[in-house]
Image (tube, grey):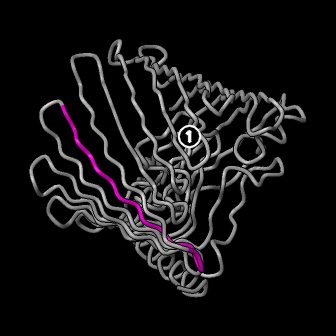
Amino acid sequence: MKMEKLRLSMVVMATLSVVSTTNANSLKDALENGKVSGKFQAYNFGNKNVSGKKDYDITTLGFDLSYETLRINGFGGKATFQSATSPWVDSDAKVGAAGDMWGSGGQLSELYLSYKIAETTAQIGRMYLSSTLIASSSSRVNTQSYQGIMLSSNDLPDTNVKLAYVNKYQNRTDSEGNFGTFDNVGDDGAYVISVKNKSIKDLTLTTAYLDYIDSFTTTYLEAAYDLDNYRFSTQYFTSEKENEDRGYLIGIKGTATFDSVDLEAAYVTVDDAANVVSGLGGGTDLAYTWSEVFANQYVAGQDSYRVLATYNINPQGSIGTSYVYQDGIDYTTAYTALIGNYKFSGNFDGLSLYASYEVGSKDSDERASRIKLNYAF
């Protein structure tokens, strides 16, 4: 799909929306009773001995504000403004965190029209997108966003189908100290189709295909089976860049819950031919052996393992520890992490805290701390 087609589609839907809403008696109520939401954020990231770069520490503050209308004859809309600042950033942090945390300014990251009929919803414009192989990530203060069209349907029994085409992508930053801008997704954009099916009791099947036109393709398959307090999963990635060999990834994972304790063990292997491309956006990092900061599960010729134990103190808080081991062609790395989460209640309802500390070993001497304080309203 070319840019002209996307612009035409946006004009058509905007026209339909205006016609529908201006003729509706409830337009005033739809606007006055729309939902306002937002969040305040304070994130501190500290990295030591990262790939030969200087140590750095950065604190970034953020404020997001969203407004979503009520639907009129199936039509609706939403807008989200994001802003961020790093008031105490030094020269080392400007280099080390340029790609994700040093990005001051603001951006209208969501501005879309939507239409819903039965269990099918269409959206067009700027949006946070969540599909298997094109997905926004909110792991930093600045959330990634896309411009395009998305169709999501639950009309088929026990099945969700998502179709999306994007032609612009807003990353967290522009790598020069500013908030991310909407840049072209190649010359012709990217499209994805993903299907999740739960028609067989206790079994969830996921399949997805992404074509980043003239750049790469990625296919993903996953099967997850629940048995009492256990879950067993297996995943398969394959990707191919233009004029390069195809890469393959296979993963298996088992989880178990015993009272207040959650346990997890996973293994991932990548063949020798090529690195695997997991998709477009940070939200597509689905390989089972991820760590809190450093692990890269998609490297050709690498086997990786992960174990995790989490103790749920109460419904609001948990503490845990993870260990990731990576065995590559000419290296061995390992990462041990401590993780804590807490969601406040009562007078502080909406406030949440996440903290982690990860230490590298074997061939890695990297260390990192992460503290994230969020207040959502």
In front of the other: 299 or 259:
299
Residue 66 pos. (x, y %): 55, 46
Determine whether, in the image, residue 158 is placed left or right of residue 35: left
Q: Quarter-wise, where is residue 49 in the image?
A: top right
Residue positioned 27% across, 33% down in the render: 255
The answer to whether residue 238 is magenta is yes
In front of the other: 334 or 18:
334
Instruction: Say whether residue 110 is visible.
Output: yes
* Bounds of the magenta segment: 230-244
Residue positioned 58% across, 75% down in the render: 244
Residue 167 pos. (x, y %): 59, 73
Identify the amino acid type marked 1: Ala
Disc 1: which residue: 295
Residue 41 pos. (x, y %): 63, 31
Residue positioned 32% across, 61% down in the render: 221
Determine whether, in the image, residue 202 is placed left or right of residue 377: left
- Mark 1 residue crowding within 10 angstroms, few (<14) / some (14–19) / many (20+): some
